[in-house]
């Protein structure tokens, strides 16, 4: 099983890095994304750890990571990262 990133998720990661770099420096931004990468790999091993949220279409899982929520879909072959959103965002309108 592997991790696939949607186009929006890739854009989210760029935005997260840019925010971190502007506010905390490049090293901190790199460390944050490195730790997020470790978390995404954790999801490969425990993809059903977080409950399925059927109020969204398609149904997704929401995994909290520090100040972000990883929105993902689990299939038998891969984990699709739909978005990586800051917890303060209006999430239903962003998925």
Image (spheres, helix red, strand yellow):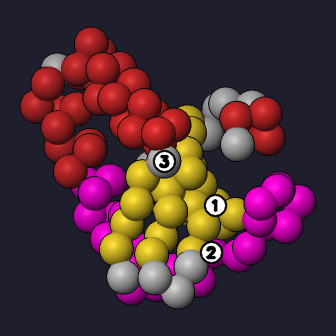
**From mark 1 to mark 2, how far is it between C-alphas?**
6 Å
Q: Measured along the vertical axis of the image, is residue 33 above or below residue 15?
A: below
The quarter of the picture where the N terminus appears is bottom left
Q: Measuring from the top left, give residue 50's x and y in whole percent.
A: 62, 74
First in residue order: circle 1 vs circle 2: 2
- Side of 26 relative to 88 (left or right): left
Q: Measuring from the top left, give residue 77's x and y in whole percent.
A: 46, 82
Q: Secondary structure at mark 2?
A: loop
**What residue sits right under mark 3 in the picture?**
6
**From mark 1 to mark 3, how far is it between C-alphas?**
15 Å
**Which quarter of the figure has residue 59?**
bottom right
**Which quarter of the figure has residue 86?**
top right
Q: Are marks 1 and 2 in contact (CB under 8 Å)?
A: yes
Q: Secondary structure at mark 1?
A: strand
Q: Are marks 2 and 3 in contact (CB under 8 Å)?
A: no
Residue located 45% across and 34% down the image: 12
User: 10 Å neighbourhood of mark 3: few (<14), some, or many (≥20)?
Assistant: some
**Which quarter of the figure has residue 10?**
top left
First in residue order: circle 2 vs circle 3: 3
| Region in magenta | 35-59
Residue located 50% across and 56% down the image: 81
- Side of 23 relative to 84 (left or right): left
User: 10 Å neighbourhood of mark 1: few (<14), some, or many (≥20)?
Assistant: some
**What residue sits right under mark 2 in the picture?**
50
Of residues 80 and 40, which is closer to you in this image?
80
First in residue order: circle 1 vs circle 3: 3
**From mark 2 to mark 3, how far is it between C-alphas?**
19 Å
Q: Measured along the vertical axis of the image, is residue 3 above or below residue 92?
A: below
The quarter of the picture where the C terminus appears is top right
Residue 56 visible (yes or no): yes
């Amino acid at each position: 099983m592997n991790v696939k990133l949607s186009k929006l998720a890739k854009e989210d990661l760029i935005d997260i890095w840019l925010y971190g770099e502007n506010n905390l420096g490049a090293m901190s931004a790199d460390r944050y994304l490195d730790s997020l990468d470790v978390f995404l790999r954790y999801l490969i091993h425990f993809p059903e750890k977080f409950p399925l949220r059927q109020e969204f279409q398609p149904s997704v899982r929401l995994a909290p990571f520090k100040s972000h929520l990883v929105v993902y879909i689990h299939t038998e072959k891969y984990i699709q990262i739909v978005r990586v959103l800051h917890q303060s965002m209006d999430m239903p309108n962003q998925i």
